[in-house]
Image (cartoon, rainbow, N blue to C red):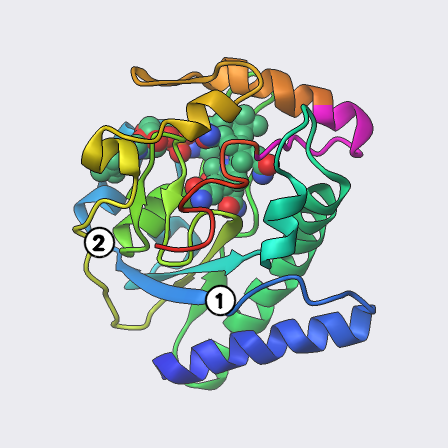
Amino acid sequence: MRQGIEQALVSFIDDYCHNNNVANMWQQPLVRYASVDNPIIRQLKTLVHPEHRMPEDFLPAAKSIISYYLPFKENIGKSNIGGELASPEWAKAYATTNKMAAQLNLQLVDYIKAHGFDAASSGNPGRIAKDIHFSNWSQRHVAYAAGHGSFGLNNMLITERGCCGRFFSVITSLPFADEEYQGERCLYKSKGACKLCMAACPVGALTTEGFDRLKCSIMGDKSAAIYNGDTICGKCVAGMPYAYRG
Ligand code: B12
């Protein structure tokens, strides 16, 4: 079943590109499972925000959450190295991925139901409100619980294919659970070295003390003005040592 889900995801992406005349801009997806009993999942309301949703809110019989990562092809990350604003290629990849993932999630739900289990899409939730910089469904916490990787100094979850890509998730009744990743992929956290992401951030939102989401939002707001409201930037991932490898 696990293999079937991975293969289905790949063919849904191919079909999406074909049917919508969109270039395939993703590498092979990474698919992992978080148990709903994982302590990170149980503590989401405390770790993220009191309004954070629980898996059972989507699906009463929830047992696991599929967390999948769509890594962008390398040319997209490379296009975004340097400069102040996100590159047009980065902006297009962001918008296209979000649009496609809404459909992928629904197709995954249908696939799982057709195989006798239950599932519900988490959608692609943004901020709770314009002035609340948190989501009520944190893809990154779910991805961490599913063992996708470790958090870097850039505040990104670094997967085995790096951090130039996007996470999505589907809540299911499948009895699968992966272990959390025990390694450390950030060079600063493992060796005290690198700090390239700090230097690349145009607004100084990254320091060794942590991530300043309000400063980061300045870049998001600037880009929204030229990219149809999309709050993007990505200078803290493009061209980094772990942009594309784990
Ligand atoms: C709101 C939001 C923003 C806002 C606010 C920033 C923010 N990080 O909250 C703005 C617009 C500024 C923003 C910017 C960006 N975002 Co954004 N954003 C979101 C959104 C919608 C919700 C984030 C949220 O609520 N997080 C909850 C808070 C509490 O957690 P956090 O910010 O992730 O920080 C936690 C981690 O650092 C974690 N942590 C750190 N170390 C450790 C260690 C352990 C053990 C654990 C458990 C946790 C942990 O603890 C922090 C606090 O709890 C998510 C999508 C979603 N629905 O999840 C995307 C998301 C986080 N964004 C993403 C991206 C790619 C970006 C940008 C690169 C913009 C772009 N696409 O060009 C920048 C990067 C900013 C950065 N360096 O973090 C990706 C991250 C992918 C990844 N590899 O991590 C996400 C997951 C979207 C997606 N679907 O893939 N974003």
Residue 129 screen position, x and y as percent = 57, 24
Which quarter holds ligand 1? Answer: top left
Residue 241 screen position, x and y as percent = 41, 44
Residue 170 screen position, x and y as percent = 45, 60
Q: CA distance from mark 2 to mark 1?
A: 17 Å
Given residues 76 and 19, the one toward you in this image is: 76
Q: Is residue 40 visible?
A: yes
In screen coordinates, is 119 left or right of 221? left
Residue type indicated by callout 1: Pro
Residue at point 72%, 38% (across, down):
87
Identify the element where label 2 is drawn: loop
User: Is residue 86 magenta-colored?
Assistant: no
Category of crowding for the residue at label 2, using alpha-carbon neighbours closer than 10 angstroms: few (below 14), some (14–19), many (at least 20): some
The quadrant of the rendering that contains the N terminus is bottom left
Q: Is residue 51 visible?
A: no
Given residues 156 and 230, the one toward you in this image is: 156
What residue is pinned by disc 2?
Answer: 181
Where does the magenta region start and end? Answer: 223-234
Of helix, strand and loop, which mostly describes the magenta segment? loop
Residue type indicated by callout 2: Tyr
What residue is pinned by disc 1?
Answer: 29
Residue at point 79%, 23% (across, down):
225
In screen coordinates, is 39 left or right of 165? left
Whether ligand 1 has any atom under 8 Å from the Cβ at mark 2 is answered as no
Residue at point 32%, 73% (across, down):
174
